[in-house]
Amino acid sequence: MNESTFPGTQHLPSSIEPMSSPTPEPSAPGHPFDAAPGAEASSTPDSATAEPDAETTPTSHRTVVPHSYAEMPRPTAKLTAEDVQPVNDPHGAIKIGPTGRPLPDLPEVQPPTRRGPAQVIAMCNQKGGVGKTTTTINLGAAIAETGRKVLLIDFDPQGSASIGLGVQPHDLELSVYNLLMQRDIRPDEVIRPTKVDNLDLLPANIDLSAAEVQLVQEVAREYTLQRVLEPILPYYDIVLIDCAPSLGLLTVNALTASNGIVVPLECEFFALRGLAMLTDTIGKVQDRLNPKLEIVGILGTMFDGRTTHAREVLDRVVQAFDERVFHTVIRRTVKFPETTVVGEPITTYAPSSSAATQYRDLAKEVLARCPAG
Ligand SMILES: Nc1ncnc2c1ncn2[C@@H]1O[C@H](COP(=O)(O)OP(=O)(O)OP(=O)(O)O)[C@@H](O)[C@H]1O
Ligand SMILES: [Mg+2]
């Protein structure tokens, strides 16, 4: 397996600045989140049929970092409601996706020709409730459908990925915590199959919160998860790690053990605020612990294309991260909370729903960007 690169993802944008400082500070010209000159702020979502917004001039001169959605400048490249629905051009050649870029033809995923060693991908964003767990479960299930062997690691003491796959965290005798902290525990004692073919789970529960404290005493503490995973990588094609909403030692362990990161990002204004801190942490892990680590992609989640707001946020993210933003976005639907209740992925709960299709499309993009695909 060539595990050297995810294309075009070696370097993180240096120009992302935090949007959370109490006083507005000047930022570099051309900053992707800069206000456009003369741009008007909008604070109300419009409907899908709203008029396209007025033209704005390119970003480059204004330097005020916005602090609220009301202050948020208009994006420079305008998306209209029509853009949000994929539309064929009159000749059927170009399809514009929800990110405002032409949709590439994603090739059908071929069955795997060999097994492992697995690519390890962390689902990471320190902001809570952005769709990390939902993406881990459903991307994992969609990849498993292609015949690849997938391991999901619940790396959050909340145990949400375990619950989402029908495992009750408080019933667990052994969890990822035991694997991390007790050298006499073997992975096969903790990993369990799920109801989905080719999809295994390394579950977690509240015990894992103790690991965050106990690991501090360990030698090479940042490499603990990597050491534990090493012997099982040959048995899987993809390992997905569901990180907790923090940038603490557990998340650093996840990033150190990974080849790639997927950053789920809720399509709302506050989602942009933590990105600078996240990219800073990723940069530090790349420099000091794991030079192989790369951003596989940024995923827009809970997208509601009927609002100007969601489109503007997505537009901003595309301005900042460009081709690293997945063409696939996950739209807001009540189906996801329902799947948590039944404890199974959307791909089995509602296999022909558009939500299931979105995660299958994401699986195609991830596998296309991932050399092991
Ligand atoms: N596309 C979506 N549409 C509607 N609801 C969604 C969508 N994706 C996730 N949700 C719901 O949003 C909530 C938060 O999602 P999820 O648990 O995946 O986020 P998270 O980032 O893992 O949260 P945490 O940071 O607490 O671990 C859940 O109730 C989930 O069912
Ligand atoms: Mg979660």
Image (spheres, rainbow, N blue to C red):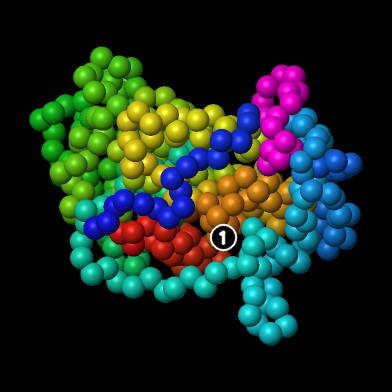
Residue 132 position within the rendered picture, expressed as x and y whole percent measured from the top left: 48, 43
Asked if residue 115 lies left or right of residue 166, the reply is left
Q: Residues within 10 Å of mark 1 (few under 14, many from 20)?
A: many
Residue 154 position within the rendered picture, expressed as x and y whole percent measured from the top left: 35, 40
Circle 1: residue type:
His
| Residue drawn at (27%, 43%) of the image | 202
- Numbered disc total: 1
| Residue drawn at (43%, 45%) of the image | 10
What element does badge 1 sit on? loop
Where is the N terminus found, in terms of image quarters?
bottom left
Magenta-colored span:
19-34
- Identify the main secondary structure in magenta: loop
Nearest the eye: 306 or 203: 306
Asked if residue 86 lies left or right of residue 71, the reply is left
Residue 156 in sight from this viewpoint = no
Asked if residue 240 lies left or right of residue 98, the reply is left
Where is the C terminus found, in terms of image quarters?
bottom left
Q: 253 above or below 362?
A: above
Residue 167 position within the rendered picture, expressed as x and y whole percent measured from the top left: 33, 44
The furthest residue to the top: 217
